[in-house]
Image: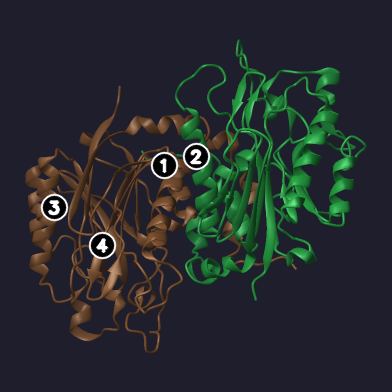
Chain colours: A brown, B green
Amino acid sequence: MARLLRVAAAQMGPTQRAEPRPVTLARLVALLERAAQQGAQLVVFPELAFTTFFPRWLLEGAELEGYYERAMPNPAVQALFDRARELGIGFYVGYAELTPDGQHFNSAITVGPDGAILGKYRKVHLPGSVEPRDGARFQQLEKRYFEYGDLGFPAFRGAEAWHRPVMGMLVCNDRRWPEAWRVYGLQDVELMVMGYNSAAYDPNGGTSENEEIRTFHSNIAVQANAYMNATWAVSVAKAGNEDGSGLIGSSIIVDPNGVIVAQAQSLGDEVLVAEIDLDAVRQGKDKMFHFASHRRPDHYRRIVDQVGAEAPR
Amino acid sequence: MARLLRVAAAQMGPTQRAEPRPVTLARLVALLERAAQQGAQLVVFPELAFTTFFPRWLLEGAELEGYYERAMPNPAVQALFDRARELGIGFYVGYAELTPDGQHFNSAITVGPDGAILGKYRKVHLPGSVEPRDGARFQQLEKRYFEYGDLGFPAFRGAEAWHRPVMGMLVCNDRRWPEAWRVYGLQDVELMVMGYNSAAYDPNGGTSENEEIRTFHSNIAVQANAYMNATWAVSVAKAGNEDGSGLIGSSIIVDPNGVIVAQAQSLGDEVLVAEIDLDAVRQGKDKMFHFASHRRPDHYRRIVDQVGAEAPR
């Protein structure tokens, strides 16, 4: 018997720095409602979905503090949680987390159709730098504004109404790291969900990678890792031009063969819905990627014994 | 200054079980000469290039023994080594290895332009089974005919004339395993070479995966792993119909962005040549995939601590 689930990718267009937070939240609620109209049971929003991608600026004081959530939910986002529960829909959403003891993380949660938080994740693979680059118009300061995620890659069970899929979360740059996918694969993951804000070009004028190749990178990383771990994946962009800095789109829903079954066509607010059969993961998990039969961890030691690359002489 | 190298993928069409070994060897020499005419300095041949893909049959005695090489080179393959040295070309070739103490491996070597063996690899990820499947027309008995590779994933330096690239070898199914690529990535690999014999469809009549999807799998695994490890890759098929069992083609040369720069168009003997700039790996290795800056091995422990998948409750 097929285990069917209707999932949605709720891509967001740009969120300008000056956009009031209630306006942004209303966009999330509108996307949720559009997904509900198409029967979606689980909606995936982007990384840092409640605000602009603020690590592109060197900030301090009240503006910087205003980007973090001190609890989840909280009054500024409660309307999204309330509407989702009314509609009986769950969601993944990325946000900047400030803990009671003062730690900062680039986090994501998955909320069930009853409003309960089913899983939480803190981004492990932070790109960028701690110190700003002199003279650059745009920064990438994730290593300054966030600590490295301290929860590992914790798989969890989705809701009963979703057929309790084994789920895993990533945030943005994590999707390019096969280690992250494999740790979830080793927990038998059936559905990976992730949001991202990925530069469409060098915002400071470099020309080494254009929008086309960056979109291609985003797609093949998700496609191949979904295939190699025999899992469904929903990967969702915040897209378009945020205050002069471009972000790629190409939100996708990918099957366990690595095939794209739905793909965003715009750089704006856009909803993709697909009905997925969770049991489609079995072909890969039981045969080509039956890990217990084929993996040889004795030969993988460098993956944990070494951080950087070391070339032979 | 660019570090340029002309590489060739020497795809082979099918080798029937009845084809005399000297005929097969003459095909390899002809492919080598075609590559030389196009200026190639390094030619990549398939897995088990000297024979048919014999693990598809349950065999014993003299026929089985005849498929293994007891030394490399040996009189049956010497003509290839001699011609390559005359032409000043190096090559990767896959073969069935029988060691003096009676061990069997699915191996590959890379030979330099002077005929010296620069590197050796024994396939780690053996697919198939030890025991034959009752009633099946075709078997996949690699786990019966070979022991698991015992050399790990040893990167090595290519020849001076090739600008001493850091090289890594895989064999067939290994290319679908991100752990294998990452262990080479952690040795700063610049050029991955591999050969394969991959079924185009279920030779026993199953319909779950057709030739198109199997070819797609082969391509995206190589493309994404090349991208995620910022390396060039040359992946070469034995293709076509071997005694009623179909093999995919799609030999490819892939750049460090994961983009295919050359791709076979046939299922027969075919040579692809590309001039590659080894320094093109720097963009990825110095930035997005600068491992020392971004990897978090503490969170990767499951990759070595666990063989099979373990689902959360």
For label 3, count other residues whose C-alpha is less than 10 Å away and answer few (under 14), some (14-19) or many (20+). Answer: many
Which residue has dot 1 on it? A258
Check the residue under mark 3 and report the chain it is in.
A
Rounded to the nearest angstrom, the CA distance separating label 4 from label 3 is 14 Å
Q: Is residue B65 something one can see in this rendering?
A: yes
Q: Are marks 4 and 1 in contact (CB under 8 Å)?
A: no
The image shows residue B233, relative to residue A307, as above or below, that is: above
**Residue B189 in sight from this viewpoint:** no
Tag shown at residue B217: 2
**Of A205 and B134, the residue lying toward us:** A205
Are callouts 4 and 3 both on one chain? yes
Question: Do the residues under discs 1 and 3 have CB atoms within 8 angstroms?
Answer: no
Circle 2 marks a residue in which chain? B
**Residue located 38% across and 78% down the image:** A205
Q: Nearer the viewer, mark 2 or mark 3?
A: 2
Q: CA distance from mark 1 to mark 3?
A: 26 Å
Q: Quadrant of residue B255?
A: bottom right
The residue pinned by badge 4 equals A239
Circle 3 SS class: helix
Q: State the count of labels.
A: 4
**Residue B274, quarter of the rendered image:** bottom right
Q: In the rendered structure, which amino acid carries the disc numbered 1? A: Gly
Find numbered disc 1 in the image and state the secondary structure of the residue it sits on.
Answer: loop
Circle 1/circle 2 CB separation < 8 Å: yes
Marks 2, 3 in one chain:
no
Q: Nearer the viewer, mark 4 or mark 3?
A: 4
Please name whichever residue, A284 or A168, is drawn nearer the observer in this view of the structure.
A284
Give the mark, 4 or 1, whose residue is nearer the N terminus: 4
Q: How many C-alpha atoms fall within 10 Å of the one at disc 1: few (<14), some, or many (≥20)?
A: many
Q: Which residue is mark 3?
A: A31
Give the chain letter at badge 1.
Answer: A
The first of marks 1 and 3 along the sequence is 3
